[in-house]
Every structure is written in structure tokens, then in C-alpha cells.
Image (cartoon, helix red, strand yellow):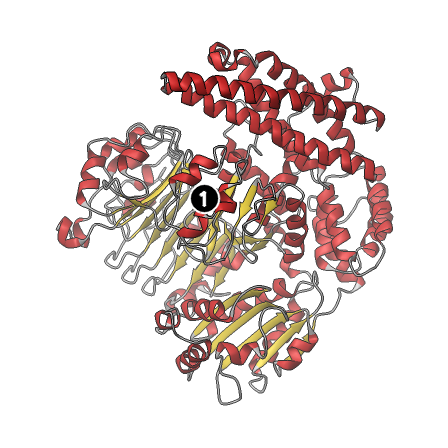
């Protein structure tokens, strides 16, 4: 299981060594002259280790001796990486400091580093002898073959295919279950409905469809992920904020008891017709009745309908819930679901004749569990040989049908991943349970942006550098591959990925093998990756001595801890090889750009980070805006993603909504900018000439003229404009928006009409979303001519006329469907 991660780590270190050996600047550095031959030797030996790791990865089972060898290799690779990075840090330091003290320190550093390199060389020699005894050493000819074979990302292309969503996977074995849940909800005699069943049966998957299809029928709705560790107060705060209760601020105050908070919630929901889903409720989450502890009103006199998913029948009984037992799939349903994912490119999603018998046997071994069927099927989707299927079937038969049956099935799916995907998928364990990973950079909810995940992969050297390809694009490809392999679940209703809790348990155990900790470790434990999620931490915790002792810490994550607003200097002094720093990405909900040097970051600080690729910040005062106009950020020419929120007080800037400031023109030096998000700005004209800009998000902005001229724009989101009555007619001109695939118009209360499309306008548009635009009466004229169009989605507060025209048999429905039957029209 661990070999894939070890291969990825070793290749990352090899890449660094290759740069050091080849780069003339390093060779000339006096500090490294003594180590050059050592680094060349390390480079050669690590190449042999990589080949041996690949040999181990191909073994069907690992003996205890091989497992111990893998652990030794992992530690060697970690230590080699530490040596390389510490040399890099010392090299930078000596280049900027030429004092006598520096020269003395340099001699001390050389002495200590020499001893460490000697030690690691001895360990490598011993490890390679063990590899030879275990028959893991590959011949030189095989090494040459490996070096000339396809790159990992090229091999990954074989896994890539169109989105599974296009196959409408939810249609399999979902419809009748969904109708049954809706029938129970319509029966107000049941205040609480509990969907009960073992993990992997698809409880959450089913409820997501029920929730997305029915929430529009209620005054308010909320989806709450409970999991194993949530406190009552955390759940109460989540519930109050998601259903927009005015008492949310009262509940979050210190001194308010859980009982009093429950009373606030109960009073706030009285008389409201609401739908609340409590997903993944465990015995360990709370004591007593969760429903009453939260303050949710129940009983026939109330209109609050509650649905719970749980693995515990006892827990459902304690809630006085009507129990809906989630059953295993039937044989027919299992076969249909398996074929959908195993043979997506074949007509009718059915296997070729030579594989049909093996496919039936494989389905039987998956125990009629949806999660097992999907992951196994997806792992076999690009396996045309009967020998591949016979090997997979043999592995499945060894699994048996014990209590850990489903985990063993998932382990097989994980083991079949190529090494580069193993480490990337395992990284999802760094995020809290039930995290949503948003499809788009601009989704604002309780999600983590997928861009964050990709940039963390890059920082961890999980993504290779290849000529002619951006690392971010390769990372996006990896995400698509994980989706296609069913390791990431898609919730189309909320436009996000999630990781099933069973898969998360699997990768958490994997990461613990690689010195990853999920709580502050004691001094004796060596930790290289530390993830502190949902711990309500403050600035004091990162000054504690146990943390300062972790000198080899590579990644430090404080996910969802807004209480941490600054990083003490002593931490950065001790953790010298930290990777997830601000060198490439500055992105935080509380990051404020200031001229005040006492702040976490000043404008001058940011302007010096010339390798910065992603930056989100707020403008707090006019002086910062003036500094941007003076070109202080001109040097950030590697910027790819930029988000700017104008938070200048109206009195200071003397601005009104009708005269919003424009982003300074000097910022167009960021020629490689691909994604831009603006809040409370007038759209500057220079943006329209940005040749590489693909995604544009405008919230509470003005002046949309000329956007149609943007040559590479693929995603356009216009949000929260309280004054706009009509969009520019130029939006529909011939040749306009030549690459736009996704257009979203959200929260335009006065918008009455969408511009008509001339022949040749928006020719590649695939998705049109109209969200909370109550005065729009029809879709744009000419929309029916768009041959690439796949979806028209209308959400919240749609006008009755628009609904009539778009419903089946309506005027716009008939016009669009006449020439393009593939288009799906969804009205919430």
C-alpha cells in the first residue's frame, strides 16, 4: 500500500538532486563544492531505489521483510530530502551574508552535514544489499527502459475520459428509493426519518439527491455533516448559519449554554416549513437524543422535517425515528451499476463477449455494495485483457466476507493506482472529515477550493515538471482521474467533490505510515506533516515547545482555524524546511493587504514574493489602492490566480456603488493571469485584453462592457448586482465569447432580459445558470442554435413565466429540444 507514496517521494528528491548536479550556480557555490560528488552518488543510488520500489509495487503481496525494507527506504528518502533542502537554505543565506560569523557558521555547517551525508550513504549501501537479497534490484537495462518509457502523466492520460456525470450515474438504483424517502417526508406523522445501513451502501448518495430535488419546497433547508467528533455547539452554530437564523450570532457567543442555544434554535424554527438532513450520525458524536440536543422541533404540530443517515439502528430508535433500512443492491442493479463504470465507452455500457463471464464473477465478489462496485469497476475501465480481469478476480476472492470486507475491497482499488495518484489521493486525509471540495475557484460556502489542493500537491513535489505543460494543469488532470476512478464522489447539486468516509479512513492510516500527525505531537515523535483540523486553535498553540521541536516539518495545516492570524518568528526559525509557506500562494479569508508593517503581510512583503502564483486579498484603505496604481505589484509576473476584494470604507474613498474604482492598469503586467475574482470594482477595460484569462468572477461589480471580446474566457460568473436591469447587448454579438463554456448569472434582482444571441455568438457554451433572477422571463433568443449546449439550470425565485416556458412542452423547451435533444433543463 505504501510503495506508491515512497516512489513519489523518491522521485521528488531525485528531481531536486538533478537540478543541483546540473545547475552551474550550485556547482560554483563554495558551500556545496565539498558535497558535489556525494550528491552525484546519491542521485545514482536513488535511481536504483526508485527502480526497486517499482519492483515492490508490482508484487501481489508484501512479506514482512519487504515491508521493513520499505520503511527503511522511506526514512532514507525523508532524510536525504532534509539534507538537500537544508543545503539550499544555507546556500541562500551565505549568498546574502558575507560576515566572519557567517564563515564560521559555514564551517560548522559543513562539518555537521558531512557527518550526516556519510551516515546516509552507509544506510543506502546497506539498504541496496537488502534489496538485492529480496530480488528487488532491477538490471541496468531495465532502468534504461524505465527512463525512456512514457512519463507518468502520459500514462495517466490512459485513465482519463469524459466526466462520469454525463452517463447520469444517479439513475441506477436510486429512483425508487428516492420516491420512498419523499413519500415518508410527505407523511407528516413521521417527524424524523432515519436511513440506516452499513458503510458503502450509498446512504449519503441517496440523500443528496433527495435534498437537491426537494429543498425548494421548503422555507429553509440545511445539510449538516455530523461525523464522529463534532460537538453540539459546533452543530448548533452550523445549523443556525446555514438556515440563516438571526440568532446565529447569539449562539456563537461565549457563556451561552448548549441548552440555551437549543432553545434559541427551537424558537427560530417554530412555524417554518424546513428540511434538515443530519448526515453520518455516530454514537460517539453526542450523548442522548441528538434531535432534542440541537433544539429541532418535532411532532405533528411542527413543519420541520428531519432526515438522518446512520449506521446504528439503536441510535435511530433513540431518536424515535421512522427507520428506512438501506438494502444491498439487487443482482440486476449491481450488474447495471458495475457496467456503467467499467465499460463507459461501449454502447449500452456492456462488456465485450470475452469479458462478460469474468465481469459477472467480479460483480458477485463485490457483495452488492455500491461503493465497492463503483471503485472496482472504475479501476478496471481501461483493462482490455482477460489476464488483467483474471488477476483482479483472484485478488477479490482472497478478500473474503468478514467485517472488514469493504475496507479490503477499497484497499485493492487504492493499490491499483499508479504511484503519482496514490500520494495525491492520500493527501485528502489532510482535510477535515466531510469537507466539500468546490469545482470552481469562486464558490463561496463551507468548501475548500480545489486550487488549494493542487497547489499543495505542487508544494509537496507530487506533481512533476514537464516541458510544455503547467504543473497546475497536470494537477487538474489528476483530479479528473480520481473522479473517474470513483475515489472522489461528485455532488452535482452543490458543485463539489467529497471523499467517502471509508476511503478517508483508509488514507488516514496510510499517511500515519509517513510520519503525518493529526494532533500536536509530543517531543519524542518525529513529524513531517502536521494537520490540525477543526480544533478551534489560536495563535498560542503554534508557539508551544513540542511544535518547535519538529525541525523536519514539511507541511503545517491549520484548516478551518480562523483564530490563527499570525505566525511567530521563532516557529519559522525552527521549521526551516517548511514547504507549505507563502512563496507560491497567499490565500485566506482573513488575509488583509496593508501598508502597516505590524500586520501579517504588508504590500512591500507581497511585492518581494516574485514567485507568487496565487493571491487573494482585501483592500482596506485608499493608500493601498494608490500603491497598486504606482505599480508596487508589477514584479508578480508569475501570477496565475488573483482575487481582490474592495473593502475601502465609503466615507474614506468617497465612493458610491455607481462609481466603483477600477483595478489599476499597471497590474496588467501579470500576463499569465488565468483566473481573476473581483468584489466591488468597476471592471477595468484592460482585463478584456488578457489573452490567458480563462475564469472571471465578478461580485457586486459594474461595467461589463467588452467582456465578450475576451479571447480565452471559459467561465464567467456575474453575481450580486442590485442595479443592473439588462446586460450589454454586445454579449450576443457574432464572434463574442469564442471559448466561453460556462456562464452563471446569480442574484440580479432587477435583471429583466438576457441579450439575444446572433449567429456565431457563444458557440461553445455548454452550461447556462440563472440563479435568483426573479424578473427574467425567458432564456436568450438564439440559444437553441448552440450545438455544444448541455445544461440550462434555473435556481431560486425564478419567474412564473420563465418556468412555464422552460418546463416540458413549454415554448422555450420545445424550441431548444427541437434541434438538441441532449440538453438537460433543470428548474429548482
Instruction: Write the residue at 55% across / 12% down.
Output: 34
**Residue 60 visible, this angle:** no
Q: In which quarter of the image is the N terminus?
A: top right
Left or right, 468 with respect to 383, comes to: left
Q: Name the residue under label 1.
A: 741
| Coordinates of residue 125 in the picture (x, y in percent) | 74, 21
| Coordinates of residue 162 in the picture (x, y in percent) | 60, 43
Q: In which quarter of the image is residue 381?
A: top right
| Coordinates of residue 475 in the picture (x, y in percent) | 54, 37
Viewer-nearest residue: 170 or 544: 544
Left or right, 397 with respect to 544, comes to: right
Instruction: Write the residue at 80% across / 35% down.
Output: 66
Q: In which quarter of the image is residue 41?
A: top right
| Coordinates of residue 350 in the picture (x, y in percent) | 76, 49
Task: Name above or below for residue 235 compared with residue 816.
Answer: below
How packed mark 1 is, by other alpha carbons closer than 10 Å (few <14, some 14-19, many 20 or more), is many
Viewer-nearest residue: 122 or 588: 122
Amino acid at each position: 500500500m505504501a510503495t506508491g507514496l515512497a516512489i513519489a517521494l523518491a522521485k521528488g528528491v531525485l528531481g531536486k538532486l538533478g537540478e543541483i548536479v546540473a545547475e552551474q550556480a550550485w556547482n560554483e557555490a563554495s558551500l556545496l563544492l565539498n558535497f558535489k560528488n556525494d550528491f552525484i552518488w546519491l542521485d545514482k543510488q536513488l535511481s536504483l531505489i526508485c527502480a526497486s520500489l517499482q519492483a515492490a509495487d508490482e508484487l501481489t503481496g508484501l512479506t514482512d521483510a519487504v515491508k521493513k525494507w520499505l520503511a527503511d527506504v522511506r526514512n532514507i528518502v525523508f532524510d536525504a530530502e532534509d539534507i538537500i533542502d537544508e543545503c539550499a537554505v544555507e546556500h541562500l543565506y551565505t549568498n546574502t551574508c558575507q560576515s566572519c560569523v557567517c564563515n564560521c557558521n559555514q564551517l560548522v555547517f559543513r562539518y555537521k552535514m558531512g557527518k550526516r551525508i556519510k551516515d546516509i550513504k552507509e544506510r543506502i549501501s546497506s539498504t541496496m544489499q537488502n534489496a538485492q537479497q529480496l530480488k528487488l534490484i532491477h538490471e541496468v537495462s531495465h532502468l534504461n527502459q524505465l527512463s525512456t518509457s512514457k512519463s507518468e502523466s502520459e500514462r495517466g492520460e490512459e485513465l482519463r475520459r469524459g466526466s462520469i456525470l454525463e452517463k447520469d450515474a444517479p439513475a441506477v438504483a436510486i429512483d425508487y428509493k428516492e420516491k420512498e424517502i419523499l413519500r415518508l417526508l410527505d407523511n407528516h406523522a413521521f417527524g424524523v426519518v432515519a436511513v440506516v445501513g452499513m458503510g458503502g451502501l450509498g446512504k449519503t448518495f441517496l440523500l443528496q439527491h433527495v435534498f437537491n430535488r426537494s429543498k425548494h419546497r421548503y422555507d429553509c433547508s440545511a445539510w449538516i455533516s455530523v461525523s464522529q467528533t463534532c460537538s453540539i455547539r459546533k452543530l448548533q452554530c452550523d445549523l443556525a448559519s446555514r438556515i440563516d437564523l438571526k440568532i446565529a450570532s447569539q449562539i456563537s457567543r461565549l457563556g451561552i449554554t448548549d441548552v440555551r442555544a437549543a432553545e434559541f434554535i427551537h424558537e427560530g424554527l417554530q412555524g417554518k416549513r424546513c428540511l434538515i438532513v443530519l448526515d453520518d450520525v455516530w454514537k460517539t458524536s453526542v450523548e442522548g437524543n441528538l434531535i432534542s440536543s440541537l433544539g429541532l422541533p418535532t411532532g405533528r404540530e411542527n413543519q420541520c422535517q428531519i432526515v438522518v443517515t446512520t449506521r446504528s439502528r439503536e441510535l435511530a430508535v433513540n431518536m424515535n425515528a421512522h427507520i428506512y433500512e438501506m438494502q444491498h443492491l439487487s443482482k440486476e442493479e449491481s450488474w447495471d451499476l458495475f457496467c456503467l463504470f467499467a465499460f463507459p465507452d461501449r454502447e449500452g455500457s456492456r462488456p465485450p463477449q470475452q469479458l462478460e463471464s469474468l465481469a459477472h464473477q467480479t460483480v458477485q465478489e463485490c457483495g452488492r455494495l455500491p461503493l465497492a462496485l463503483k471503485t472496482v469497476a472504475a479501476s478496471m475501465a481501461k483493462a482490455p485483457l482477460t489476464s488483467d480481469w483474471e488477476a483482479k478476480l483472484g485478488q477479490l476472492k482472497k478478500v473474503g466476507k468478514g467485517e472488514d470486507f469493504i475496507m479490503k475491497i477499497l484497499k485493492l482499488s487504492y493499490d491499483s493506482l499508479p504511484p503519482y495518484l496514490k500520494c495525491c489521493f492520500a493527501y485528502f486525509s489532510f482535510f477535515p472529515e466531510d469537507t466539500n471540495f468546490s469545482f470552481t475557484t469562486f464558490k463561496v460556502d463551507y468548501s475548500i477550493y480545489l486550487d488549494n489542493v493542487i497547489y499543495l500537491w505542487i508544494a509537496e513535489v507530487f506533481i512533476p515538471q514537464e516541458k510544455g505543460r503547467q504543473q497546475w494543469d497536470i494537477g487538474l488532470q489528476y483530479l479528473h482521474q480520481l473522479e473517474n476512478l470513483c475515489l472522489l464522489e461528485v455532488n452535482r447539486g452543490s458543485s463539489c467533490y467529497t471523499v467517502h468516509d471509508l476511503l478517508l479512513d483508509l488514507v488516514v492510516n496510510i499517511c500515519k505510515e509517513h510520519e503525518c500527525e493529526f494532533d500536536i505531537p509530543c517531543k519524542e515523535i518525529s513529524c513531517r506533516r502536521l494537520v490540525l483540523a477543526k480544533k478551534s486553535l489560536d495563535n498560542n498553540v503554534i508557539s508551544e515547545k513540542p511544535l518547535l521541536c519538529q525541525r523536519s516539518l514539511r507541511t503545517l495545516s491549520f484548516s478551518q482555524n480562523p483564530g490563527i492570524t499570525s505566525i511567530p518568528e521563532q516557529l519559522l526559525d525552527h521549521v526551516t524546511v517548511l514547504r507549505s509557506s507563502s512563496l507560491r500562494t497567499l490565500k485566506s479569508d482573513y488575509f488583509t493587504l496593508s501598508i502597516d508593517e505590524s500586520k501579517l503581510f504588508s504590500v512591500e512583503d507581497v511585492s518581494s514574493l516574485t514567485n507568487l502564483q496565487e493571491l487573494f486579498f482585501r483592500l482596506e484603505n485608499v493608500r493601498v489602492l494608490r500603491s497598486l496604481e504606482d505599480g508596487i505589484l508589477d514584479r508578480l509576473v508569475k501570477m496565475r490566480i488573483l482575487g481582490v476584494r474592495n473593502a475601502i470604507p465609503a466615507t474614506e474613498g468617497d465612493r458610491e456603488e455607481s462609481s466603483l474604482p477600477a483595478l489599476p492598469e499597471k497590474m496588467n503586467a501579470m500576463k499569465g493571469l488565468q483566473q481573476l475574482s473581483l468584489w466591488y470594482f468597476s471592471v477595468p477595460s484592460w482585463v478584456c485584453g488578457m489573452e490567458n484569462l480563462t475564469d472571471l468572477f465578478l461580485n457586486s461589480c459594474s461595467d461589463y462592457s467588452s467582456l465578450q471580446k475576451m479571447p480565452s474566457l471559459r467561465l464567467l460568473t456575474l453575481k450580486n448586482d442590485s442595479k443592473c436591469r439588462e446586460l450589454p447587448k454586445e454579449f450576443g454579438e457574432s464572434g463574442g465569447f469564442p471559448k466561453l463554456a460556462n456562464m452563471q448569472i446569480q442574484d440580479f434582482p432587477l435583471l429583466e432580459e438576457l441579450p439575444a444571441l446572433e449567429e456565431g455568438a457563444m458557440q461553445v457554451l455548454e452550461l447556462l445558470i440563472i440563479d435568483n433572477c426573479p424578473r427574467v422571463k425567458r432564456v436568450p433568443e438564439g440559444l437553441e442554435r448552440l450545438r455544444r449546449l448541455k445544461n440550462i439550470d434555473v435556481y431560486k425565485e425564478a419567474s412564473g413565466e420563465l418556468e412555464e416556458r422552460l418546463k416540458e412542452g413549454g415554448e422555450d423547451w420545445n424550441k431548444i429540444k427541437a434541434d438538441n435533444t441532449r440538453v438537460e433543463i433543470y428548474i429548482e
